[in-house]
Amino acid sequence: MDASNISRLLTRVGIGDRAAFRDLYGATSAKLFGICLRVLKDRTDAEDVLQDVYIKIWNNASSYQVSGYSPMTWLITIARNQAIDRLRSRRTAASDLSDAENLADRKPTPEQSAIRMGEADRLRRCLDQLAPDRAKAVKAVYLEGYSYQEMADQLNQPINTVRTWLRRSLISLKECLSS
Amino acid sequence: MTERPFNPEDEDSLLAAEFALGLLQGAAREDFERRKAADPALAALVRYWDEQFAGLTDDLAAVAPPAKVKTQLERRLFGSSTAWNSLSLWRGLAVAALTALVVVASFNLRTTPSQPTETLVAQVAGEGSRLNLTAFYSDATGELHLNRSAGTPSADRSFELWIIIGTQPPISLGVLPANTVTRVAVPLDLRPKLKGSVLAVSDEPAGGSPTGAPTGPVLGTGRLMAI
């Protein structure tokens, strides 16, 4: 299903159309569940959060069109933020020792590398232009929900140093993306 | 990579990126949210970063969620949807209603049965209070009384009123006139189905949607409930 179809469905969901909501769920739930699973790494939590995601979508769809977002980004952003919120509340509940591994280098599998090379995606190219540890940090913040404090603890650096470091990565990223 | 001081003009973009990533917390986050609500340029910067970062999910495998997620979701949103659609439930209700009618009729043999009238009300509003509309409906008149306290279409646009009954596509109830207080007659066949249905107002080209379905942004929705 292409973006304009998703957009049309979202518009109908915005006026309470349940049939459109079911179609939207059918077309997008696998993508959004994949994101919840990646962030939470726990099926039960991901299933739970996916429900919250679609309840948010149902309740906020009427504001989608005025938001100016492309439809998939609108959906992905809700899913990612909801999953990160759950992850963070889980982390506060029990500090997760394995988190320390997440900032460490993780090499893509061969299949992932193939996808990466196959797609001329600007974001990916620009991330590749960053120093590897910086690109990794940006991805980790998006997909693991790290706070500056957590990064500072893990990298054993003052929080301001970490913030400046990440901000420089974001500036470089933006310059590359807009060039 | 060259290290140089931050440009002041980069500051808002950086804050927007940090906001999008969830790196702003506490007072910094609240300050930014307040500014973003008042400044479309800032909201656009956040949107820019959200669009970029969403690309980080391109590589993630799509995984079909188990069917029970959808069942639970529908129950949370729409009540027990499977029971709702079951024919036997409706047959049961119909029998019960008929029985009740017979009982009521036998009690009311000597009194003039009063016509039960139902009044429904809906508050049609959306985020950012671009529109606020109160709708009253009375069985007695078959009309919706509308009172719009916020929202005016721009010069070349019209507000169109829609009704959504159950899972059916929206049905147009017409373009709202310029008056903020107005009445709209509800077609006869729709009247018995109004309770629990949803009213919606969309922003359309002048004169209303050219397609018969909403084409513009939905400014607000509200469910018609009995009072």
Image: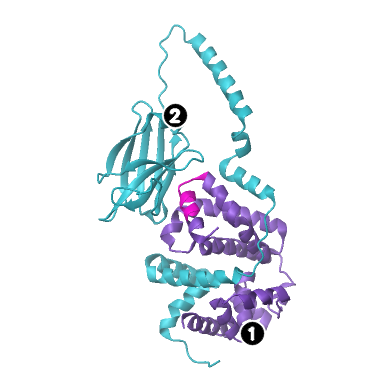
Query: Which is more toward the observer, B23 or A31?
Result: A31
How far separated are the C-alphas under marks 1 and 2? 64 Å
**On the picture, is B221 further left or further right than A158?**
left
Q: Which residue does the numbered mark 2 point to in the structure image?
A: B192
Note whether residue B121 is visible: yes
* Model colouring: by chain
**Is residue A18 placed above or below B26 in the rendered structure?**
above
Q: Residue at x 37, y 32 (%)?
A: B187
Rendered shade, chain A: purple
- Residue B198 x/y as whole percent: 45, 41
Which quadrant holds residue B161? Answer: top left
Q: Chain of mark 2?
A: B
Q: Amino acid at mark 1?
A: Pro
Q: Which residue does the numbered mark 1 point to in the structure image?
A: A132
Mark 1 Cα shell of 10 Å, populated few (<14), some (14-19), many (≥20): few
* Quarter of the N terminus of chain B within the rendering: bottom right
Q: Residue at x 58, y 55 (%)?
A: A27
Which chain has been coloured cyan in this picture?
Answer: B
Magenta range = A8-18
